[in-house]
Image (cartoon, coloured by chain):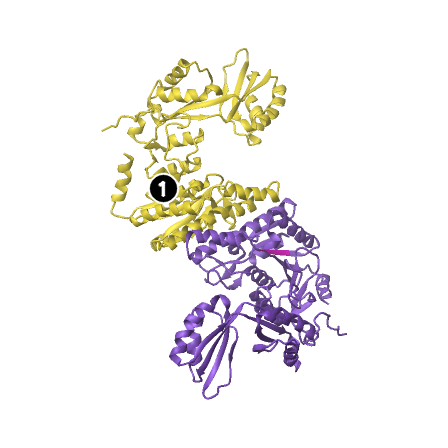
Chain colours: A yellow, B purple
Amino acid sequence: MYINYFKNRLELPFVSLIVQKYGGTSVAGPDRIANVANRVVKDWRDGNKMVVVLSAMSGETDRLINLAKELADEPDPRELDVLLATGEQVTVSLFSMFLRGQGVPAASLLSHQACIYTDRSYGRARIIGIDTARIREELKKNRVVTVAGFQGVDEGGNITTLGRGGSDTTAVAIAAALKADLCEIFTDVDGVYTTDPRICPKARRLDRISYDEMLEMASLGAKVLEIRSVGFAKRYDVPLRVRSTFTTHPGTLVTAEDEEMEAIPVSGVAFSKLDARVTITRVPDRPGIAVRLFKPVAEANIVVDMIIQNTSIDGLTDLTFTVPKGDLHKTLALVKPVTQEIGAQQVLSDENIAKVSIIGVGMRNNAGIASRMFEALSASGINILMISTSEIKISCVIEDKYGELAVRVLHDAFDLENPPPKKK
Amino acid sequence: MYINYFKNRLELPFVSLIVQKYGGTSVAGPDRIANVANRVVKDWRDGNKMVVVLSAMSGETDRLINLAKELADEPDPRELDVLLATGEQVTVSLFSMFLRGQGVPAASLLSHQACIYTDRSYGRARIIGIDTARIREELKKNRVVTVAGFQGVDEGGNITTLGRGGSDTTAVAIAAALKADLCEIFTDVDGVYTTDPRICPKARRLDRISYDEMLEMASLGAKVLEIRSVGFAKRYDVPLRVRSTFTTHPGTLVTAEDEEMEAIPVSGVAFSKLDARVTITRVPDRPGIAVRLFKPVAEANIVVDMIIQNTSIDGLTDLTFTVPKGDLHKTLALVKPVTQEIGAQQVLSDENIAKVSIIGVGMRNNAGIASRMFEALSASGINILMISTSEIKISCVIEDKYGELAVRVLHDAFDLENPPPKKK
């Protein structure tokens, strides 16, 4: 299905415009850069217009951050971005000089040259627009255009960076701005899997997945794509392909959902051990209590994931929520005084939890998915501590020792090992 | 004398504007960057407006060139400049974040932000103009402005570099454009000496030297200042100070010549073993012969230094010239066929030569300097192979084994060990 999709594009009478992004491990040294460049040359010789977005060599960003920390405890954000931006500058220039050495016309563009405009939030800037005139000019000269990923320029001409994984966003944003036929994210895995193959050996690589499912997978801990890039791809309907730099397999296509996808109730199982649970017992069930508890937590930039409040009995309720393990200590310090003020009983916490989730756009039209999930977990003696649902996902918090087991159990329960039957 | 000059400037009612440049060894790592930054803070706290031009950490440019050579035998010049420019980008950002960490307002500017415009000659670009608006804007905010040395931007917005030593030129050009009160070049030596102290222990540091003398010293092998930066300083009358990053000594002031300087016949002795000598014997003395010999050499970008042609006898003459040792082989290959065509006798070459020169603006008004030089060399049994003179310099080519001896002999002959008597 996926392959047909791509072939159709290539069979169009006009030349395809492809944006490719290669991550840090794909350009980790001169040999790998040459390897990647040779892949690009092949696609270019096939008659495609090529824009290539590169990350810094793996390890380079950390090296630069360590240098910065030797000079300032909290490096100035503007200057840190100037420093970090050198990582991608090195790879795009090396890449382009390799291509030119092979007689392939190429030009590198930095963010201010490629006109990738962002807001002023150094270190986590958002792309607000791209003026593609210069990229188009280079493409007209039949050049392979290499663009430094991860970075942008604000209205004052200052360098900004987009945060970890930002090169994915650069690639998708450029693909959207150029109305590219395809955006390919090359990485060290060969696609999106039904679940983490290290936990579940039966995990199956998906040929296709919808934007929404990918968004849930990314937010639930699958690290294959930066979440903002998926949101961008969805908003601008950019066909996105996740594939490996080190194989020729076409990988997984992330695209708008269609009837075929909607027929599949569950596409994948996600898993995370990053959160801890906080429970406040016997909370008076009065308006304004939740605000008093969560406002200080939000103000400390702590991301609360799940929040569960039971129906109150005698005007008292138990309130449970999850926060990243690293923020647990801080959260307790913020919450405990409020607990006393509002007259709740006590604050309990638990770090030994895992979250296991099933994801699928077909869930919308499929009753009984949740109960199949609970049944499968129960049949394996796994107790559910918390439940949270969205339109296309169900998450359960369980004891962490059962985490991996739960993944395998759910993978079997929804028969993810086998590809869904094709519709004709 | 020098110190008064500077003090006068500081005593002016308005704030002094100082441009400082720190070379690669001065910013070789985080500790040294912090050390340099502390020097700058001191000058800034004294009430000066500070613009700081930085080189890449020593070794970084070579590291990047080696990376490039792994990807291309002859790296594309445009892409090589993109790569090399990262070296200074790293130092300016680290430097500025250190200052900000100390509570000192600072901002780094890259060449396109500081608007340092150059021609398109990648790798050896010339500065054609600087729009100082952004620098002035930052100075008005009382910030220490850090500018990436060595690099510029062409009219197409491409990154260019100025070639080795280019950061000196960046600093002087910015000082000229800002009409700065002083441009200080911080390096690993503490000033300009009468000659190389490693050869002649009696060498004396000069308090002052004229632009023209410095130009001759630089072109004759003294590596303390990049020659283009001296030319720039002379053209725009920028007071230039050469001093050490590792001491507090005020170093040497390079400035316009005055009567006091003109009273000193010889200011320094320069020395170089970089050239080789080519002699073509029995050349027919006809018009156009020199063109036929030197045109192919020039076209191969080989720099011919001295050219000596003896008066012809019987319509035949000997022609001798010097080229860099590294270009000797290529030069001989170019010259030999021409020699046969024009009917000259043979081509001889000699790599065992040294060039020793005396320099001084006072030479202009002082007869007998040349003969004192020849006499001193002769008295030590040193044979002169070639002689070349300019208005303020006399160079002799000698056998290289006598090179160091010649330097010491001339240093003594012109009593350079002792400072010249002060005029009242």
Q: Quadrant of residue B352?
A: bottom right
Q: Position of residue A300 (x, y in %)?
A: 58, 31
User: Front-most of B178 and A402?
Assistant: A402
The answer to whether one can see residue A130 in this image is: no
Residue at 45% x, 70% y: name it. B331
The residue lying toward the viewer, choosing from B340 and A62, is B340
Residue situated furthest bottom in the rendering: B314
**Residue designated by label 1:** A183
Apparent side of residue A406 relative to residue A346 in the rendered image (left or right): left
Residue B390 coordinates in the image, percent (x, y): 58, 77
Chain for numbered disc 1: A
Q: Residue at x 49, y 40 (%)?
A: A163
SS label for mark 1: strand
Residue sticking out furthest to the top: A314
- B316 vs B132, nearest the viewer: B316
- Give the total of numbered labels: 1
Residue B198 visible, this orientation: yes
Range drawn in magenta: B50-54
**Quarter the C terminus of chain A occupies:** top left
Residue A49 shown left or right of residue B105 in the figure:
left
Q: Dominant secondary structure of the magenta stretch?
A: strand
How crowded pointer 1 is (Cα within 10 Å; few <14, some 14-19, many 20+) is rated as many
> Residue at (41%, 16%) from the top-left corner?
A377
Was residue A98 drawn as part of the magenta stretch in this picture?
Answer: no
Counting from the top left corner in percent of width and height, residue A297 is at 57, 28
- Vertical order, A302 against B395 (above or below): above
